[in-house]
Image (spheres, helix red, strand yellow):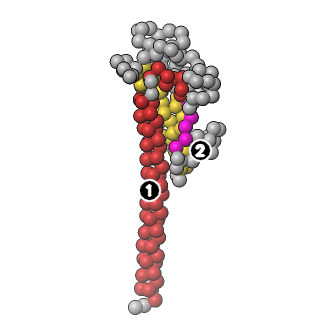
Amino acid sequence: MTLIEVMVSILILTLCTWMLSTTLMASAHHADAKRERALAVAGATNLLEHLHALPFEKIFALYNESPEDDPKSPGTAPGAHFHIAGLEAASADQDGHVGRIQLPSPGPALLEDTVDERLGLPRDLDGDLFIDQKDHAENYMVLPLLIEVEWQGSGGRRVFRLQTILSGIGRYDQ
């Protein structure tokens, strides 16, 4: 072998080693991102299942941002923010929680005439076929909500959103 052949062989071996290490690093990063997203999805769906198990008429009071209408006494309800184990809050997050439930209004009043395209508002919440300016915190029949998880992941700031409408129509709690 000549010196040129040895140099070309070393160059090819170095290039192959670099490509392999880059692929392994990208695979590890992708695995972290998938794990984080799976935690976010599981946290949001677990919360949604928890909401389904609650008495429908109490959901707004329990999960809005206002402590004034908490069912037991002010400050006793879970509120709009929640934590998911294994996820780190985004650096710009003020409350330190990765999760937030967005309802049609922050509370204690629930208004139908609120404008929010993400929640499909304005919307008839009490089933009277009219969108009015009255408080429907005590008589809503549908409750649109958005569960948003925002975290600081291995690849930077990440967000997962779950949008749905809860309904108490035809539901019988025993």
**Residue name at image x 43 percent, y 60 percent:** 27
User: Magenta region, mostly helix, strand or loop?
Assistant: loop
The mark found on residue 84 in the picture is none
Q: Residue 125, how many percent across, how many down?
A: 45, 15
Residue 153 visible in the picture: yes
Q: Quadrant of residue 124?
A: top left
**Residue name at image x 59 percent, y 20 percent:** 69
135, 138: nearer the viewer: 138
Bounds of the magenta segment: 80-84
44, 152: nearer the viewer: 44
For label 2, count other residues whose C-alpha is less than 10 Å away and answer few (under 14), some (14-19) or many (20+). many
In the picture, measured across the screen, residue 134 lies left or right of residue 49, that is: right
Which residue is identified by label 1? 31
The mark found on residue 90 in the picture is 2
**Residue name at image x 50 percent, y 36 percent:** 148
Q: Residue 55, how many percent across, how many down?
A: 45, 24
Residue type at mark 2? Ala
- Does 59 appear in magenta? no
Quadrant, the C terminus: top left
Residue type at mark 1? Ala
